[in-house]
Amino acid sequence: MESVNVAVIGFGTVGTGVARILLEGGDALAARAGVRLNLKYICDTDLTRPRGLQTPPDVLTDSLDRVLSDGSVQIVCELVGGTRIAFDIVEKALRAGKNVVTANKALLAERGMPLLKLAAECDRSIAFEASVAGGIPLLLSVRDGLVANRISSVTGIVNGTCNYILTHMTDGGLSYEQALAEAQQKGYAEADPTLDVGGGDSAHKLTILSWLAFGSPVGFEDVYCEGIDRIQPADIRFGLELGYRIKLLAIGRRNGGGCLSLRVHPAFVPRSNPLAHVSGAYNAVMVRGDAVGDTLYYGLGAGQMPTASAVVADLVDTALGRMGITFKRRQLFCDAAATVRGIDEISSRYYLRFEVLDRPGVLAAITGVLGRHDISIASCLQHEPIDATHVPLIIMTHLAREGNLRRALAEIGSLDTVRPDPATIRVIDDEERPQ
Amino acid sequence: MESVNVAVIGFGTVGTGVARILLEGGDALAARAGVRLNLKYICDTDLTRPRGLQTPPDVLTDSLDRVLSDGSVQIVCELVGGTRIAFDIVEKALRAGKNVVTANKALLAERGMPLLKLAAECDRSIAFEASVAGGIPLLLSVRDGLVANRISSVTGIVNGTCNYILTHMTDGGLSYEQALAEAQQKGYAEADPTLDVGGGDSAHKLTILSWLAFGSPVGFEDVYCEGIDRIQPADIRFGLELGYRIKLLAIGRRNGGGCLSLRVHPAFVPRSNPLAHVSGAYNAVMVRGDAVGDTLYYGLGAGQMPTASAVVADLVDTALGRMGITFKRRQLFCDAAATVRGIDEISSRYYLRFEVLDRPGVLAAITGVLGRHDISIASCLQHEPIDATHVPLIIMTHLAREGNLRRALAEIGSLDTVRPDPATIRVIDDEERPQ
């Protein structure tokens, strides 16, 4: 059986998982894969920290040069993370004639284009299944399994940290701060959770997924991004009352005229939608194609072994030569002309929660402003007072233009009967539901 | 761009769908795929029936010989169905040096082995993504996406007809006969529904899926098979009361010692399991791997365009040369030694519904027999009388050996206080739930 030499750069969580599969499950993997992946190097600056893994002598090295100058290494697996050192590693590896496998969504989304171009120039491939939705073979499914389809939308939960927090806010009645602290305690959230809870990580993944789904080289900066840190328990409760669960969604949509809209934000998901039932650290992405209709992919989107599972799948694909064919022949950016619409131009239904003075005429004033901005109201709900002076007023709108809504809210903000900063959450609806 | 000549054999529902994608979406497909699929022939004995599709002149033919003797045809797409003529077509196509793509699960499950061997001898490939779960890229995900994993189980809803019927029995309170009639009216069930409702179609699909999931050349005859035609509305109702929905499941499991168990039968699925929420004509399959954990794949498992979507994906994969590599290099049957356990040897929880005389001592008699056969009772439920003499008695067991249960039921059958043929439905449980 053919043997292919692999080097893992970055002996962290995922690197250790990949090394574990190659070292401890190597024979079984070779039998399944039809090719043997020989772990020739594991390269890291820290070689002493215990990883709970037996490594053969001479595999560990702290010299990237040694790895890259070894002509027998065919695949370099970048698992360092970040966008600076990782960029240099991938660039050098390609120039040294190596194929690359990476799990690094930040690198790809923010600085991936020049690397993909360089790979093409060097006649090498970059494989990145693990960069989106961890262990779920999502990119493979979208790129190859659904190749017959013009994909019209991708809608998914792609950040396990946020989903864990929102699930515990919903099922346990916790505040955002409490749920975040719990997630940090259990290792589901980083000490600095900004990239996850702010939506940036989901936006990285949506950028990459959109390349394959829409055939367009969209940029990270094209994704509108809103995080979960402003979600209040009251909104979770009102959502449940109305039949929705709040999820942080990444949504890419092809609109009329070939425009795309790309956005990450919390959304009310109706209970009839399978995404509403994706709990805890799980990820799930719904992909709609013109031939296949709605398909959904579900599993663990992060963690050592799920991510390593995807990295090793890419290693096999690369070692067998299939990734080379895919990378060279498949026109990933065939629809390069697509333009991305700004958030003001999307249409959505909205949940609005105002805190208003409990006084006649207030509802009329608010609905009057909404009506003048062409926003039509689907339902209205008023509950028990919040305090001595104010009551919560919930308004669900019909489909409306976001730009109109923003102008309406600015105007409502000038009313002295309404507290500033109403909660505003987009609602996904029938259109997003399997049909 | 390279162009590859394709012949579609069988101009039925799926054949028309494939032709539609190649003829009407050919340019877009070529741009995405990096290869042009040129539909050179559509071959059928009936060329006059209207298919609602414009075909170029000289494409239609009723001569298989003409297709197979045309050296420029590289891929033959068998969409005739059945196991006799289709077998001959695939055999001849391989011998004529063509690669094959097929959606024919009956052919593969019942007579696939000699064809797969022949393909290997002829250095050609047979691709069959469309044979299992229609448009869902399930086989691709299992074979390539999860290659790093030792897969321990596959559990799925793979027959849309049965799922449609069960969904309407559950949500609409219909009897089996009413729901079947409705499914036939709407085109979801054939005039002769035996293959679907009897579980045979699901067993075909489980056979094929098991090849890829477990690396073992299991046979269709290894799959234990029970259909949905004996499900009573009472069982649906009691199931809901207990927190379960009844689904026809295909279950493949790797047990201790490397044995497999393969079975198709109705099952109580707890509401906490995502499979419980798969409604109507949708399919979904949960795949558990040692690295990735639980993953789930969801979409339309049948129908013209979803099936055509999978066929065209295989055409692209074959035309790009990737399928050839996969077929040659990937050891699909690396674990050939696996033996398949009989149904008597499985362990499961059970739902049992007896109709018993409303008289003291009956419950004690039944539970006594169960106890003597090592079947322990988890809960017991007695409801309003069915008629003047009998009451329904529901027993949920703990994990028990099926052989023991059968012996116990035979003994209970000899009690004159219990009506013959109690309803017996297996319960899937924590073990099948995402963890």
Image: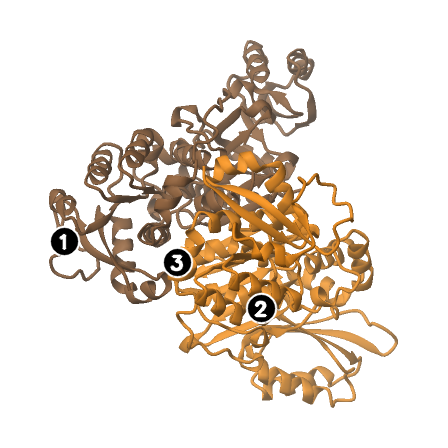
Chain colours: A brown, B orange
B416 sits left or right of B284 in the view: right
**Quadrant of the image occupied by residue B326:** bottom left
Question: Which residue is found at the position 40% from the left and 50% from the top?
Answer: A135
Q: Amino acid at mark 1?
A: Leu
Which numbered disc flags the more N-terminal residue, 3 or 2?
2
The image shows residue A342 at horizontal and vertical percentages of 50, 19
**Image: A396 above or below B335:** above
User: Which residue is tagged 3?
Assistant: B147
A316 sits left or right of B295 in the view: left
**Image: B51 above or below B401:** above
Give the position of the C terminus of chain A as an image quadrant. top right
Chain letter for mark 2:
B
**Badge 3: residue crowd in 10 Å (few <14, some 14–19, many ≥20):** many
Q: Point out the residue furthest to the right here.
A: B388
The residues bearing labels 2 and 1 have C-alpha atoms spaced at a distance of: 47 Å
Chain letter for mark 3:
B
User: Which residue is tagged 2?
Assistant: B109
Q: Secondary structure at mark 1?
A: strand
A73 sits left or right of B391 in the view: left
User: Same chain, marks 2 and 1?
Assistant: no
User: Which residue is tagged 1?
Assistant: A60
The image shows residue A427 at horizontal and vertical percentages of 59, 31
